[in-house]
Image (tube, rainbow, N blue to C red):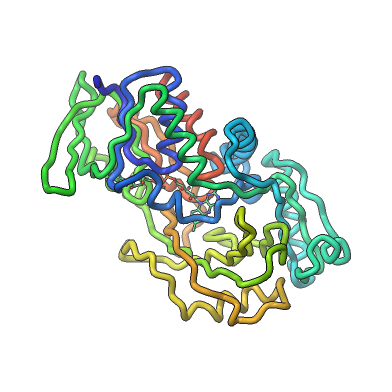
Amino acid sequence: MQITTTIIGAGVVGLAIAAELSTTRRGILILDRNPSFGQETSSRNSEVIHAGIYYARDSLKARLCVEGNRMLYRICEAGRIPHRRCGKLIVATEKAEEGILASIRERARENGTDPLELLSARQIRQLEPNVKASAALFSPATGIISAHRLMRRYLSQATRNGAQLVTRTTVERVEPAGAEGYRIHVAYPDGLSDVFTSRQVVNCAGLDSDCIAESMGIDVDACGYRLHYWKGEYFSLEVPAGFIKRLIYPVPQENHVGLGVHATIDLSDRVKLGPNATYLPDRNIDYAVDATARQSFFEATVRYLPGIAAVQLHPEMTGIRPKLQKPGDPARDFIIAEESSKGLPGLVNLIGIESPGLTASPAIAKYVGALIGG
Ligand SMILES: Cc1cc2nc3c(=O)[nH]c(=O)nc-3n(C[C@H](O)[C@H](O)[C@H](O)COP(=O)(O)OP(=O)(O)OC[C@H]3O[C@@H](n4cnc5c(N)ncnc54)[C@H](O)[C@@H]3O)c2cc1C
């Protein structure tokens, strides 16, 4: 195959981009270091279709999440991808938090999400008898999805159009190769290596995306491309099916490092609590759940689910957020940049694609398609 466009990373974003680009071009190669697609962050998340409520006005996160939310429901319906538009409640557990709900509602309005409805304590009890809150916002556009089935759908669309996925292939570095585009150096698990050229490169290597950019000679510290890892752990909550019918979120933390320990349901009605947010200064990829965190998860959740006991919480799973901020830094937007201005035409870097990257994936793909031409 004559390779024209190489996509580094077969997570939900790389696969969405492959599906989008493959509608208008041939010679697309998707590379991933794991034995199969979607084995890192894309399979270690809450699987929530976000509405786009919290993000800064006009940011890529806000715009691509709101657009992605609408596109995703259409993709799910057309492709019979398991999903549910269950809605979510953002709950105030004390009077002081009720003022924050008003600012969240205003931000959501500015971002163009479906309007949020303010609910009283009585309305909350009627909808969710196990939730205790003095007020809440109801988001009708929030839902849940099977991330694996979505990725399978993107992949099958891309391969039907001639794209090829090659797994167990680690991209070690990318260097400019003049008129030929870029030279891509790859390594295989058996110790062998290879080099090939590609006219365009799309770097969606998730946790490794800043290292790939650095290998191209970009000063990632000067450009603000350096990633910081934040671990997010989950506990499952052993409760009867239907204990909650919607996603329940506390009001978010000030710094937006995470949305606070929330209660999500999955498509089989299991309840998951989390994720918390722990900074990993050494960037160790460690997916173990710290069982001693049970008490802090319990204390965070019992405020709005007062009927639960700590023994009902069980360590479940972990994901690692590829953030552009370290502790104390302000919230950052996604970086999605075509790098002609750095002397690297035809190269697109996607860095810091944390939440809501799953929701935004179809809109990100459209955006990248526009950046590098049809
Ligand atoms: C705890 C947590 C909860 C989240 N919850 C939600 C949510 O509910 N809703 C939502 O919308 N978003 C959520 N997100 C965000 C969402 O999961 C991510 O934005 C999305 O999965 C990012 O996809 P990606 O394809 O960019 O990255 P990844 O899934 O990390 O894919 C990158 C791929 O690149 C490959 N790769 C890396 N380096 C190399 C290399 N050198 N060579 C070859 N291949 C390489 C990896 O193997 C990987 O498959 C959450 C994230 C976390 C961490």
- At x 82%, y 63%, the residue is 124
Q: In the rendered image, is residue 125 in sight?
A: yes
Relative to 297, residue 88 above or below:
above
Give the image location of residue 231, x and y in percent: 43, 64
Residue at the limit of the structure toward the right, as seen here: 122
Relative to 314, residue 60 above or below:
above
Horizontally, residue 87 falls left or right of residue 157, namely: right
Give the image location of residue 337, x and y in percent: 41, 34
Relative to 98, residue 22 above or below:
above
Q: In the rendered image, is residue 253 in sight?
A: no
- At x 43%, y 17%, the residue is 24
- At x 46%, y 56%, the residue is 44
- At x 47%, y 34%, the residue is 154
Task: Tell me the quarter of the image containing the C terminus.
Answer: top left
Say which quarter of the image contains residue 289: bottom left
Relative to 168, residue 154 above or below:
above
Give the image location of residue 370, x and y in percent: 47, 23
Task: Tell me the quarter of the image containing the N terminus.
Answer: top left
Give the image location of residue 139, x and y in percent: 73, 50
- Nearer to me, 149 or 96: 149
